[in-house]
Amino acid sequence: MSEPVAPQRRPVWPRVRWWLVVAVVVVVGAVGVGVVTGAAGRPLAPDSAAHDGGKALAVLLRAHGVSVRTADSVDAAGGAVLVPFADTLPRSALATLRRRAEVVVLVDPSPGLLPGWRPLPAGGGRTDPGCGWAGAVAGPVDLPDGTARWSPPAGGLSCNGGPYARSAGAGAVLVVLGSRDLLRNDHLARAGAAALALNAITDAGRVRSVTWLDALADTGAPTRSVWELVPAGVERVAVWLLVVVGGLLALWRGRRFGPVVTEPLPVVVPAAELVVGHGRLYRRAGARDRAAAALRAGSLDRLVHALGLPPGAGADEVARAAADTTGLPAAGLLAGAAPRTDAELIGLAARLAELERAARARSSATDSMAP
């Protein structure tokens, strides 16, 4: 009997290296998405470095010695208050701001928020200050297209044809800027834009602290969905990243496909060892039902040949023929319930072997008596 050959296990590294490669690709792609999109966030947020963010303005204010803090409630207002989305600000919140702050800067407000103010036709392009305001020393300003223009109430001041207007009535000074694009990161570098934004918010350097009302919680502004919070361009980059990863996976798995290759076994396994191996596997798994089924199937096939029955004879037919031929009880041997213990399984194997021996002996005797 030959020595059993220990199964060879594949090394772990070849099995996991490709998964590590895929993981590295996904991580690098995620980092690339972060680099491409930058520190994107809400439009005109003071910490957003995206094109439509307001980080450049916040950095400019701090560089001129102005403290900048963010708030989401009008109760936290103080100093100069910047309201980037004034079109959602209710009148009650504006009244609270004018009582608490020194300067209130409304960016692109709705007409209904400013009774007594008269909207003018929108415009754009480079315009001269055309006013005596101290903050207009920077000269012409390059205005975005579609900038709203306002005419303040009597006693107010309007510069650059209306995109900057102020009124110093009761309470805080009220300043109106006609376009949110004036404060965007990608617009501040244009002619006069940074100077106009800086002087408008600080009232020409008079106020040294700014409260940036970022995402007001009590204005009734409509909430945005999760998809609207995803930075622009991320969807496109993510789709291409998935395409690349899918292509790499297809190449990795596809290279293994091909015709089936047969290889000779490294050793010759005798049939007896194979039977013993199967038996040990059944015993380890406690699979008495499968072991009994294998024993009964083998005995059934051999009894059909020994008794001269037609191929495909059923277990009941073979059992009756074996009982008539051998005189041994065969009911329940070739079909029935599975053994519940190892002892019952061994007893079943012994009775099947005895039935087979008796059937072969009677068949041999019958053949020898034939003329």
Image (tube, helix red, strand yellow):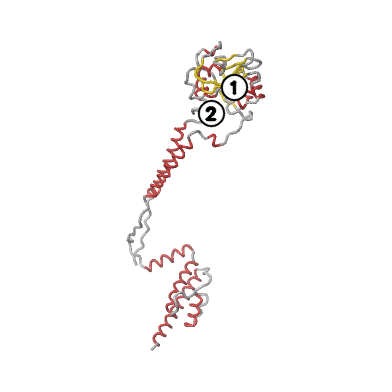
| Residue 183, position as x, y percentages in the image | 52, 23
Can residue 62 be seen in this snapshot? no
Image height of 195 relative to 294, above or below: above
101 versus 35 height, above or below: above
**With 91 as the anchor, is 244 left or right in this view?**
left
Work out whether residue 94 can be spotted.
yes
Instruction: Check disc 1 and report its element: helix, strand or loop.
Output: strand
Query: For the view shown, which residue lies furthest in the front direction?
Result: 121
In the rendered image, which quarter contains the C terminus? bottom left
Q: Which mark is residue 43?
A: 2
The three-letter amino acid code for the residue at tag 2 is Pro
* Circle 2: element type: loop
Who's the residue at 63% across and 12% down the image?
155
Residue 4 screen position, x and y as percent: 36, 62
Location of residue 82 with respect to 261 vertically, above or below: above
Q: Residue furthest bottom?
A: 371
Q: CA distance from mark 1 to mark 2?
A: 15 Å
Residues tagged 1 and 2 counted as in contact (Cβ below 8 A): no
Identify which residue, 124 or 358, lies in the foreground: 124
Report the front residue among 365 and 191.
191
Task: Quickly name the residue at label 1.
Answer: 106
The residue positioned 46% from the left and 65% from the top of the image is 282
Amino acid carrying label 1: it is Leu
Residue 5 spot, x, y in % from top left: 35, 61
Q: Which image quadrant is residue 176 in?
A: top right
Of marks 1 and 2, which one's residue comes earlier in the chain? 2
**Coordinates of residue 55 in the picture (x, y in percent):** 51, 25
